[in-house]
Image: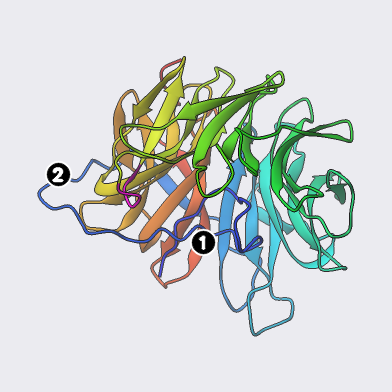
């Protein structure tokens, strides 16, 4: 069964980074949006009996990163490695000595970040460059702590999350080997999911300690973390991407029902509902500097499809022949990556190539 993806995030299952979207009741009598004009290319896998891959980020050179099953032992469960795809070739980036790794972000210099298990069964954020994977450590570089990197900009600033000495996870911004704790919105934990070239960080944080705290999207800039709020009567939100214009995307609950979530675009203090592909819920995962937004949404038939939103219109990017798909990232050329169920039932990373040059709100 297809499971739509999101950027690797610090959830209970750590290296199991496929976000399971529980399908809701299908909404009938809603016209199906038109399919966007373009071509979806199957990027394949690194091999392995589980036949799985997921693309998480693409830069402006068309280099794609993500994670994929591998043909390496053990055979009784999936062993997944970070990959770099370019010019039709998928390269295994290896690990920090452990079993699994996942790439989450790439900048225009081809530097890759993500997280990997170590030989000591820990899990650390990594920076991969020139064929070498380096650990970024944690706040205190304690063997009992874990971390993960989600984004890297052209200035080699890295955003992500790390556990603290108190056992909670906090968002970080790492530069020149120094990992800075970005704090929280008042709760115990936070995580950074996106970063632009201005050093602005987005993510999510709890607003107060349990049981009163709610998870809210935030924008962090120059030492200040701002709560982006929610839409309507929604209580929780998460920010997943930001462009160099300071436009932020993610998802928010829109009603008191926690089962209904909509993709949002936040700019200049205003959060806008991007709607759905005819179904109940949608999630925005990435935005480029033209203001084009990608993500995934339920359709009127109850399936989940990748979408491209631009100039107020959400369009369906289709699938690789299977029932579902999800988009995770878009570059300034309008190229989109994500993962899709194939006609044979596997789940593969894809590159969606637009038939026309990118045009948005820029």
Give SS at disc 2.
loop
Q: Which residue is mark 1?
A: 348
Q: Which residue is mark 2?
A: 31
Q: Is residue 101 above or below residue 88?
A: below
Q: Where is residue 187, by image quadrant?
A: top right
> Where residue 43 sits in the image (x, y, percent)?
56, 56
Kindly tell me whether residue 331 is visible in this rendering. no
Q: Which mark is residue 77?
A: none
Magenta stretch, main secondary structure, is: loop
Within 10 Å of disc 2 (Cα), the crowding (few <14, some 14-19, many 20+) is few
Tag count in the figure? 2
Q: Looking at this view, is 135 or 211 the one in front? A: 211
Q: Is residue 235 above or below residue 343?
A: above
Magenta-tinted stretch: 257-261
> Where residue 336 sits in the image (x, y, percent)?
49, 41
Q: Which residue occupies 87% across, 49% down?
A: 134
In this rendering, position of residue 315 left or right of residue 184: left
Quarter of the figure with the N terminus: bottom left
In this rendering, position of residue 232 left or right of residue 204: left
In this rendering, position of residue 154 left or right of residue 338: right
Q: Which residue occupies 40% across, 32% down?
A: 230
Mark nearer the N terminus (1 vs 2): 2
């Amino acid at each position: 069964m297809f499971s739509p993806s999101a950027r690797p995030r610090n959830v209970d299952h750590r290296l199991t980074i496929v976000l399971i979207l529980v399908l809701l009741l299908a909404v009938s009598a809603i016209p199906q949006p038109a399919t966007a004009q373009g071509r979806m290319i199957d990027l394949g896998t690194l091999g392995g009996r589980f036949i799985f891959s997921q693309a998480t980020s693409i830069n402006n050179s068309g280099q794609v990163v993500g994670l994929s099953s591998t043909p390496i032992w053990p055979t009784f469960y999936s062993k997944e490695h970070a990959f770099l795809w370019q010019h039709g070739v998928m390269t295994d980036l290896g690990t920090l000595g452990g079993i699994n790794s996942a790439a989450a972000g790439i900048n225009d210099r081809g530097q890759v970040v993500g997280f990997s298990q170590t030989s000591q069964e820990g899990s650390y954020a990594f920076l991969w460059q020139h064929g070498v994977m380096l650990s970024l450590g944690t706040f205190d570089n304690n063997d009992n702590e874990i971390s993960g990197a989600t984004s890297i900009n052209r200035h080699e600033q890295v955003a992500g999350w790390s556990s603290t000495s108190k056992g909670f996870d906090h968002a970080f911004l790492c530069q020149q080997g120094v990992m800075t704790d970005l704090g929280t919105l008042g709760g115990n934990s936070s995580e950074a999911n996106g970063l632009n070239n201005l050093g602005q960080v987005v993510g999510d944080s709890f607003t107060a300690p349990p049981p009163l705290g709610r998870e809210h999207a935030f924008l962090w800039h120059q030492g200040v973390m701002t709560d982006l709020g929610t839409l309507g009567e929604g209580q929780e939100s998460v920010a997943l991407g930001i462009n160099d214009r300071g436009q932020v995307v993610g998802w928010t609950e829109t009603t008191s029902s926690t089962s209904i979530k909509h993709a949002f675009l936040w700019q200049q203090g205003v959060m806008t509902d991007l709607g759905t592909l005819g179904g109940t819920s949608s999630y925005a995962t990435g935005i480029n500097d033209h203001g084009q937004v990608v993500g995934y949404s339920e359709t009127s038939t109850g399936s989940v499809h990748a979408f491209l939103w631009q100039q107020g219109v959400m369009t369906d990017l289709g699938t690789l022949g299977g029932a579902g798909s999800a988009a995770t990232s878009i570059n300034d050329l309008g190229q989109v990556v994500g993962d899709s169920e194939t006609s044979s039932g596997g789940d593969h990373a894809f590159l969606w190539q637009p038939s026309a040059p990118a045009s948005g709100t820029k």
